[in-house]
Image (tube, coloured by chain):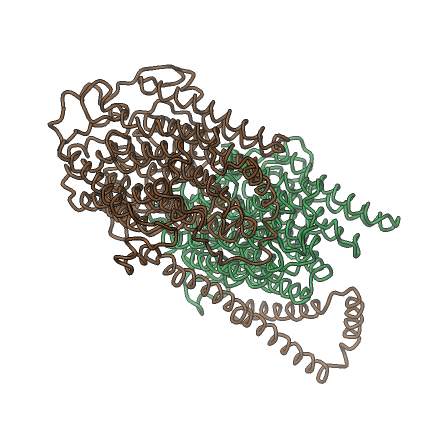
């Protein structure tokens, strides 16, 4: 056990090593070798992470290199408190930053009379997160081996996703907010690289830049939050000791002192840090990058949406929760509001999308909204639990959709289109209107996808039910009626749009013979040529299918990760069953928090909502879409609303017309200021100086010409010689400048 | 802390405790300063022997390894933690009388303020040498000028007597001017002229000021151009032979001249005049808004080696001057005008960022030049913040700001140097500077794209690379004293990132422009220049202590005075 604690740092180091190996050694020549290298290292990291979780779950910790056992806080109290103490205030007060299991630090940079320490800090929430990230990421690595096989740059792909995973793992283990932020930003880089992985496509690089810049808006505000916190606390280290940022006296101080803008320091810091969450976890109003991030290959979507980036934002919130709690509730109210709003806002958009990945993307936004909202009302455990559970089933759904798209791309109509326009082919393959009846064609995908669907919809006993139930229970029992209602409606919509998707994809007749073909607005003659190399690869791939006569096949390498993830989606709820039985409240105990109690009423409501949504979706879409060209039943009933939702409330268009245009205008304005005004002044001064110089010359020449003529001749001759050296006229001007300076000096010293 | 008092060394002069001579008695700094000059002699010899240009190019670049090696020795001998009598110790000191009549000493030394910049200079000079491998016109003159520029910049960072300091300051303009003028692009004459005159005119005030300071010091009983002593007097630290602060000494002299009766009996007035004389000189060099318009022209029109040295090292001369002269000599006025400096820094940060954004469809060098204005804005912000009114700020906050500034200067030098070098390589391959001519090059030149991408991310402050460390500590330090400006400065972080990403996109992403389907990827030699730069950026980004500890003690001592309200 000491081994897992002592060498916890290997967990991010191994994927990083994988990235380095397949980027800088000849391994990169071989797609298969680089794929298996990273998968092997990921598997090793997974093993270490699970070992670490096991060690920390038993309460082992390292103190000065010695193995000690921690008292698990919630353990003994669970029965004593039981289900009677359910008052929200009580459970809010009960949040305690868990004791660390491993802390290893070294001096990183001198800061005046002090220094800044860096290192790793593992406590039980971190251990749980590490296990989740490594497992999902290992599955995604494995899946990519099959899914990306046709891409010429597959080994580069592996190096990016390994780096991405390493950054996420390092972030989770960071012992201070600066390291946290650094790993956080490296994830931003990886998202840029991966979303823009198919960089020949304008849509891809535009989405990549958009993702980087939009999240960076949140990030720089978070950076301000960090420097604010650092200035107040004198460090950024996690922990409750004096000088660390969760020290109770310090938190009490920043909660009570008021800053210049009228908020308490804690509120200011918390809100700035929350901006980071809003960017990374794609909460309104910075949510616009996440749907566009679908331009990346599907495993990337799974990685971003489940294992890494978006979870990072919620984890940040959970990590810095004591600061949010330290103020009078303003910060948490904002958090709850933004979270709940995003949950509903994104769910409504998801209802009216046709792209299978975009539906999942908006569903991610919505689910992240759930997590953010519940943390905002003090439900720390519920938020973290949903974070972990959601990661498994959302990764499953994305990889499942990848499997579907992979199959769709091999259908004859789309394969044809592929030769003409790769991008349009892919978009067409992702359109759920063109699917249908895949239940029999892709049975493995169907069954695993169904488990993910049930988990997301919140059907008992799958993972999503338990975690979502805990969120609703927290809102219900805390008396946060607005949050509860909004989340309940969002949960209903979740069940509804997932049923719509599931129904249209897997049931009915296959509509892909007459697909709705995506029209690519970027299509140019040059574009086709650029993606030619890729074409040839794909071409060979397609021929292979055509020859065997089987359009529908499921790659075992792609199915294996689906099965692993599906088992977590099905059984994930076991980790935190809300009953006081052996093994119940496991996460609560692990994290040393007050266990939430089970309420039959809330569970009933939440089940009712889930089944209501499923029933509504099933009935409404039972007879819809006989052909792909048909209109959506909702579109028929309420075209205006559906159009608005389909266009995502036109937020992108609004940003385009306001912020983007304003930025471009500002750039022009600054350029004009430089050229016309500042340079104008400089050139003007230059001209005046020259004029004075000439005047001076005339005076010299006419009034004082005799005496200094010889000198002047000498100067002119030198000047001529100098000119032959191509020095221009600079010397002449220097003479004037120096002359002026001497006069000034005389005036300065003797006249004044 | 060493015991105060004097020590006799080398038989020349007795040195106070804050000046430490070379431990082994070798004049390392003189050797360092002379080595590029010897290189010029060798280039001249090669010319006399009519040696092949190719040999000159390689030989001169290889010779730049000599100053590099000497600087490594200096680095090894330098003790970053040494402090004495209220300041970071000046080390490897060489001091002897030069012009006795006006008390000018030959006085060289390194301390925490200059050490990092000396290292930056010697690292970037060979890069510039490599970047000029494509020069075919008057090769020997070109390399001689590069070596001369290196010598002048080294001299500037090493000289501690105003006389030499100013000579090197002005003298560095000469090779830079000729480099732009003779090997630059179409509009080179305008750019070279503007660059030369602007910098020169800007420093006249400082030149005059030092005449006055000399006279004032003579009146006070210790005529001197010694920058270390003047800095100590400015900060109120004891210096043998004189009492009172520089502010009192200048005021007493003005009173003596009768000026004080005319202009008013406000000591701050006279230090303020001094402040502005110094500030304008260095602000022009640092390209602080609104004194920045020479920079895009000069960087754009210069040959690649010129752009590299100008952006990587010369712009830092301004910041160094502020740390060496402005803050210690006139701390009261620096503190008084810190909000103004901070405001100009902020405008520069925003202006540089938007200026870069305005060039995303235009000239690549102009874009990089504007990002330099943005980055130097952060350095200016740090200096302003270190000097600003006390408020809540701790001593550490101020030190952190300046530590960040030093780091930022090093990181910006390396990353911008790499970017300019890459832009030059791109031009050599394509014959175009215009960003709208490219597209999709990542397909044909993946290594080029990877290396340029890394340099770009280092430049825009991606964590894990050195630029972020500088920016983070600058923001951290500046927040304590100038929170409003710091808060608004993040606009620059976003917009610069956008501009650079668009630059990268226009060159490398999208569909390949057919004109370039035979464009060559990076060659091993070019990789050999770039990979060390990127490696340094990565190492310092992951573990910045080697650079940050160089200046930490010196800047901590330097900013101590700003913990109190200085102006009344």
Camera-nearest residue between A296 and A231 = A296
Image height check: is B13 above or below A586? Answer: below
Spot occupied by residue A13 in the image (x, y as percentages of width and height): 49, 28
Spot occupied by residue A115 in the image (x, y as percentages of width and height): 43, 34
Relative to B142, is A492 on the left or the right? left
Among the 4 quarters of the image, the one containing residue A733: bottom right
Give the total of numbered labels.
0
Q: Is residue B261 visible?
A: yes
- The quadrant in which the N terminus of chain A is found is top left
Relative to B20, is A368 on the left or the right? left
Camera-nearest residue between A168 and A263 = A168
Spot occupied by residue A100 in the image (x, y as percentages of width and height): 33, 25
Camera-nearest residue between B348 and A606 = A606
Relative to B226, is B394 on the left or the right? left
Spot occupied by residue B265 in the image (x, y as percentages of width and height): 41, 63
Relative to A546, is A485 on the left or the right? left
Image height check: is B312 above or below A176? Answer: below
Q: Is residue B84 visible?
A: no
Chain assigned brown = A
- Image colour for chain B is green
């Amino acid at each position: 056990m000491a081994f897992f604690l002592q060498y916890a740092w290997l967990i991010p180091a191994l994927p990083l090593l994988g990235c380095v190996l397949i980027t800088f050694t000849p391994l990169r020549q071989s797609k298969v070798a680089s794929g298996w290298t990273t998968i092997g290292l990921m598997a090793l990291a997974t093993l270490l992470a699970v070992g670490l979780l096991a060690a920390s779950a038993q309460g082992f910790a390292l103190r000065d290199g010695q193995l000690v056992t921690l008292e698990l806080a919630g353990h003994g109290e669970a029965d004593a408190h039981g289900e009677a103490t359910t008052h929200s205030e009580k459970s809010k007060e009960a949040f305690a930053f868990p004791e660390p299991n491993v802390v290893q630090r070294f001096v990183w940079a001198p800061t005046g009379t002090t220094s800044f320490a860096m290192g790793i800090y593992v406590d039980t929430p971190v251990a749980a997160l590490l296990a989740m990230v490594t497992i999902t990421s290992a599955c995604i690595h494995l899946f990519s081996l099959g899914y990306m096989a046709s891409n010429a740059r597959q080994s580069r792909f592996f190096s990016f996703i390994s780096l991405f995973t390493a950054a996420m793992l390092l972030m989770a283990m960071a012992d201070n907010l600066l390291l946290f932020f650094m790993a956080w930003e490296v994830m931003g880089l990886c998202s840029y690289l991966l979303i823009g992985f198919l960089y020949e496509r304008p849509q891809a690089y535009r989405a990549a830049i958009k993702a980087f810049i939009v999240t960076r808006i949140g990030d720089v505000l978070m950076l301000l939050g960090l420097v604010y916190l650092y200035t107040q606390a004198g460090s950024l280290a996690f922990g409750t000791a004096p000088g660390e940022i969760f020290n109770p006296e310090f938190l009490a101080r920043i909660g009570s002192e008021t800053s210049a803008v009228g908020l308490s320091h804690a509120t200011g810091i918390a809100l700035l840090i929350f901006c980071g969450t809003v960017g990374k976890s794609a909460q309104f109003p910075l949510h616009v990058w996440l749907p566009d991030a679908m331009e990346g290959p599907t495993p990337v979507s799974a990685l971003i949406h489940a294992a890494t980036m978006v979870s990072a934002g919620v984890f940040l919130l959970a990590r810095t929760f004591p600061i949010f709690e330290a103020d009078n509730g303003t910060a948490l109210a904002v958090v709850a509001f933004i979270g709940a709003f995003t949950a509903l806002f994104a769910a409504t958009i998801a209802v009216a999308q046709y792209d299978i990945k975009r539906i999942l993307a908006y569903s991610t936004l919505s689910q992240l909204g759930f997590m953010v909202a519940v943390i905002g009302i003090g439900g720390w455990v519920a938020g973290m639990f949903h974070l972990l559970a959601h990661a498994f089933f959302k990764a499953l759904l994305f990889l499942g959709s990848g499997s579907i798209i992979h199959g769709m791309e091999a259908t004859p109509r789309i394969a044809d289109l592929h030769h003409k326009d790769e991008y349009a082919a892919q978009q067409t393959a992702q359109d759920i209107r063109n699917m249908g009846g895949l239940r029999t064609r892709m049975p493995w995908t169907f069954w695993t996808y169904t488990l993910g669907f049930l988990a997301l919809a919140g059907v008992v006993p799958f993972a999503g039910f338990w975690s979502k139930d805990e969120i609703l229970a927290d809102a219900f029992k805390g008396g946060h009626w607005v949050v509860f209602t909004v989340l309940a409606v969002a949960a209903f919509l979740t069940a509804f749009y997932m049923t719509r998707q599931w129904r249209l994809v897997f049931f009915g007749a296959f509509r892909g013979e007459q697909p709705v073909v995506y029209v690519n607005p970027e299509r140019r003659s040059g574009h086709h040529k650029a993606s030619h190399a890729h074409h040839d690869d794909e071409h060979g791939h397609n021929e292979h299918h055509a020859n065997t006569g089987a359009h529908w096949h499921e790659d075992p390498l792609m199915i294996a990760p689906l099965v692993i993830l599906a088992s977590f989606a099905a059984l994930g709820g076991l980790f935190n069953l809300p009953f006081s039985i052996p093994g119940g409240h496991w996460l609560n105990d692990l994290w040393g928090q007050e266990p939430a109690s089970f309420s039959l009423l809330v569970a009933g409501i939440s089940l009712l909502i889930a089944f209501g949504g499923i029933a509504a979706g099933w009935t409404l879409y039972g007879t819809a879409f006989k052909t792909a060209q048909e209109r959506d039943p909702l579109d028929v009933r309420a075209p205006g609303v559906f159009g608005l939702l389909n266009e995502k409330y036109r937020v992108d268009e609004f940003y385009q017309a306001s912020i983007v245009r304003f930025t471009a205008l500002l750039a022009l304005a600054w350029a004009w200021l430089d050229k016309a005004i500042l340079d104008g002044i400089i050139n003007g001064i230059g001209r005046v100086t020259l004029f004075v110089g000439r005047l001076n010359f005339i005076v010299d020449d006419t009034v004082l010409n005799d005496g200094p003529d010889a000198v002047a001749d000498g100067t002119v001759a030198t000047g001529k010689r100098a000119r032959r050296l191509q020095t221009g006229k600079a010397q002449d001007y220097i003479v004037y400048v120096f002359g002026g300076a001497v006069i000034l000096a005389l005036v300065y010293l003797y006249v004044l | 802390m060493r015991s105060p008092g004097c020590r006799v060394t080398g038989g020349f002069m007795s040195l106070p405790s804050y000046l430490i001579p070379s431990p082994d008695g070798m004049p390392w700094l003189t050797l360092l300063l002379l080595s590029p000059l010897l290189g010029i002699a060798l280039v001249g010899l090669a010319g006399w022997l009519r040696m092949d240009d190719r040999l000159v190019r390689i030989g001169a670049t290889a010779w730049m390894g000599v100053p590099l090696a000497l600087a490594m020795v200096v680095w090894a001998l330098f003790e970053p933690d040494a402090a004495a009598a209220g300041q970071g110790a000046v080390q490897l000191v060489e001091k002897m009388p030069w012009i006795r009549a006006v008390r000018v000493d030959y006085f060289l030394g390194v301390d925490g303020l200059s050490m990092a910049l000396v290292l930056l200079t010697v690292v970037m000079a060979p890069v510039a040498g490599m970047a000029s491998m494509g020069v075919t016109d008057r090769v020997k003159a070109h390399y001689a000028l590069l070596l001369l520029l290196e010598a002048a910049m080294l001299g500037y960072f090493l000289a501690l007597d105003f006389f030499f300091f100013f000579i090197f300051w002005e003298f560095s303009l000469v090779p830079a001017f000729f480099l732009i003028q003779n090997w630059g692009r179409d509009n080179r004459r305008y750019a070279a002229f503007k660059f030369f005159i602007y910098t020169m005119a800007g420093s006249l005030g400082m030149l005059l000021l030092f005449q006055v300071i000399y006279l004032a010091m003579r009146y006070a009983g210790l005529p001197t151009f010694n920058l270390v002593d003047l800095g100590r007097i400015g900060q109120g630290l004891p210096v043998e032979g004189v009492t009172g602060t520089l502010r009192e000494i200048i005021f007493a002299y003005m009173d003596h001249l009768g000026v004080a009766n005319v202009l008013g009996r406000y000591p701050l007035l006279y230090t303020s005049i001094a402040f502005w004389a110094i500030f304008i000189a260095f602000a022009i060099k640092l390209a602080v808004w609104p004194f920045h318009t020479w920079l895009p022209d000069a960087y754009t029109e210069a040959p690649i080696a010129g752009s590299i040295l100008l952006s990587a090292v010369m712009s830092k001369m301004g910041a160094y001057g502020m740390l060496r002269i402005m803050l210690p000599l006139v701390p009261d006025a620096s503190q008084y005008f810190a909000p103004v400096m901070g405001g100009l820094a902020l405008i520069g940060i925003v202006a540089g960022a938007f200026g870069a954004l305005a060039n995303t469809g235009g000239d690549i060098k102009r874009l990089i030049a504007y990002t330099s204005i943005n980055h130097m804005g952060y350095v200016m912000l740090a200096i302003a913040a270190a000097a600003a009114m006390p408020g809540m700020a701790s001593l550490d906050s101020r030190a952190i700001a300046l530590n960040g500034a030093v780091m930022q200067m090093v990181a910006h030098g390396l990353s911008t140097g790499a970017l300019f070098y890459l832009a030059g390589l791109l031009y050599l391959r394509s014959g175009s500077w215009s960003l709208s001519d490219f597209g999709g090059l990542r397909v044909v030149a993946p290594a080029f794209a990877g290396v340029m991408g890394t340099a770009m991310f280092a430049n825009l402050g991606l964590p894990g690379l050195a630029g972020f460390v500088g920016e983070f500590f600058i923001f951290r330090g500046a927040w304590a004293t100038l929170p409003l400006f710091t808060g608004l400065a993040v606009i620059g972080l976003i917009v610069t990132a956008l501009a650079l990403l668009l630059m990268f996109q226009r060159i490398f992403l999208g569909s390949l422009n057919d004109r370039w389907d035979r464009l060559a990827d990076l060659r091993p030699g070019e990789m050999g220049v770039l990979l060390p730069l990127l490696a340094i950026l990565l190492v310092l980004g992951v573990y910045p202590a080697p650079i940050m500890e160089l200046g930490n003690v010196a800047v901590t001592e330097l900013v101590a005075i700003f913990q109190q309200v200085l102006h009344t």
